[in-house]
Image (cartoon, rainbow, N blue to C red):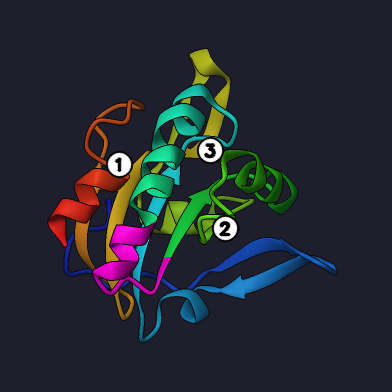
Amino acid sequence: MAIEVGDRLPESTFLVFGSEGPKEVPSGDVFSGRKVVVFAVPGAYTPTCTKEHVPSFVKAAEALSGKGVDEIVCISVNDPFVMSEWGESTGATSAGIRMLADPKGDFTSAIGLAFDAPPAGLFGRSKRYSMLVEDTVVSKLNIEPATACTISGGETILEQI
């Protein structure tokens, strides 16, 4: 069952690529006591994710910060090396967006948003969504009905806050 507004996020561990290589980031460090906008994508470097979803959050980053958002994070079932490079190439990193890898899809599965799209070669990936998390509790949630980016972009979550 998919996560819903009012649910608390499960504990999990993400990976980021830092100056000394891959580093674990506990979900509590990301969400506890903070107001965080999360968006997830089916895959780094995929067309819609790269050309629409990430840029929508790069554009909205400053306005979201102005509304009291402590951080914007992007989650994908990818490795931390890919997420780091993708963050650099899209301008997400320079916009202050933290790129979190969920390499085995543990977090994605725990919140009930894993999916497969065999025709596209995507297996064990994340559905596209955005959410506002306040001290580990989901307060806004926009799950895309398909892989398109119609209701989960930066402008939508900005309007909801």
Name the residue nearer the viewer: 28 or 152: 152
Where residue 56 appears, as percent x and y from the top left, is 36, 41
Nearer mark to the viewer, of 1 and 2: 1
Q: Which portion, as a residue range, is magenta?
A: 62-71
Front residue of 141 and 1: 141
Taking the image as shown, residue 43 lies to the left or right of residue 154, namely right
Mark in the foreground, 2 or 3: 2
- Image: 23 above or below 113: below
What is the three-letter code of the residue carrying label 1?
Gly
- The local secondary structure at tag 2 comes to strand
Give the x, y percent position of residue 87: 61, 47
Name the spot of residue 74 as percent of width and height, x first: 48, 53
Is residue 160 shown in magenta?
no
- The residue tagged with tag 1: helix, strand or loop? loop
Which image quadrant for residue 20?
bottom right
Q: Residues within 10 Å of mark 2 (few under 14, many from 20)?
A: many
What amino acid type is highlighted by mark number 3? Answer: Gly
Q: Which residue is mark 2?
A: 100
Which residue is painted at 40% across and 83% down in the image?
32
Q: Is residue 108 above or below residue 49?
A: below
Q: The C terminus is located in which quarter?
A: bottom left
Q: Which mark is residue 153?
A: 1
Q: Is residue 26 above or below residue 43?
A: below
